[in-house]
Image (cartoon, helix red, strand yellow):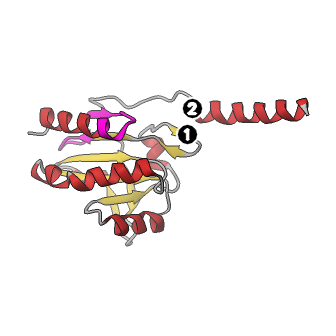
Amino acid sequence: MVTRFKIILSLFLIIFLTSCEEKEVLNVGDYAPNFSLDNGKGKQVALKDLKGSYSLIFFFGRIDNSGTVEHLTKFKNTFQFYQEKNIKLIGVSHVKQKLIDKKRNDLRLPFLILSDNEKQMIKEYKIPTSFGAAKRISFLIDKNGIIQSIIEEKEVREHHNVLKLEIEKIAQ
């Protein structure tokens, strides 16, 4: 019984520590890594398509939890703010596009959410993961593809408050 407990505890610690390992990070002032993901309709969306205007690329993990629904709904409810600031809004998750499209339709989201099912963009943007799911992080990228702000607030309301403040400061 004790041996089984030690094995289970050891496995848990290995999985937990592996999923929380420190990774090199992107910084404000860095060029945003290039990416190209299918939008679910056969069209590739790439960083180069976003140049010439500000972009907000936000990463999130699971699509079916209450925190993600709150996060997406907050973007929906403030979408006009982003439009007025001429900021393109794009979500990215590791979830399959079919599930993303269903959630977009259910919530009537007016912005694009891309599936990074192979987690290539998540790796390029050095997004920390926990048990395979990306952490909630947003990148405000300027017209030239340079990262102007990185928001890592975990609580949804605070994340959006910080985003709004950063946008008011930068994207005028």
Question: In terms of secondary structure, where does tag 1 sit?
Answer: strand
Residue 96 x %, y %:
50, 62
Residue wearing tag 1: 130
Measure how far apart labels 1 and 2 are at the Cα level. 6 Å
- Residue at horizontal 42 percent and vertical 47 percent from the top: 67
Q: Give the label on residue 43, or none.
A: none
Q: Which amino acid is tagged 1?
A: Ser
Residue wearing tag 2: 20
- On whether residue 43 falls in the magenta region, the answer is no
- On whether residue 158 falls in the magenta region, the answer is yes
Residue 107 x %, y %:
33, 64
Q: Which amino acid is tagged 2?
A: Cys
Which label's residue is closer to the chain start, 1 or 2? 2
| Res. 48 in view | no
Q: Is residue 163 left or right of residue 69?
A: left
Residue 16 x %, y %:
64, 34
Q: In this view, does 14 lie to the left or right of 48?
A: right
Q: Which of 33 and 73 is in front in this view?
A: 73
Q: Nearer the viewer, residue 30 or 169?
A: 169
Residue 94, compared with residue 153, is above or below; it is: below
Query: Which range is magenta?
Result: 140-159
- Residue 41 lies in what quarter of the image? bottom left
- Residue at horizontal 44 percent and vertical 42 percent from the top: 124
Residue 52, compared with residue 165, is above or below; it is: below
Q: How crowded is mark 1: few (under 14 residues within 10 Å), some or many (20 or more)?
A: some
Q: Does the residue at mark 1 contact the one at mark 2 (Cβ under 8 Å)?
A: yes
- Residue at horizontal 47 percent and vertical 48 percent from the top: 61
Residue 20 x %, y %:
57, 32
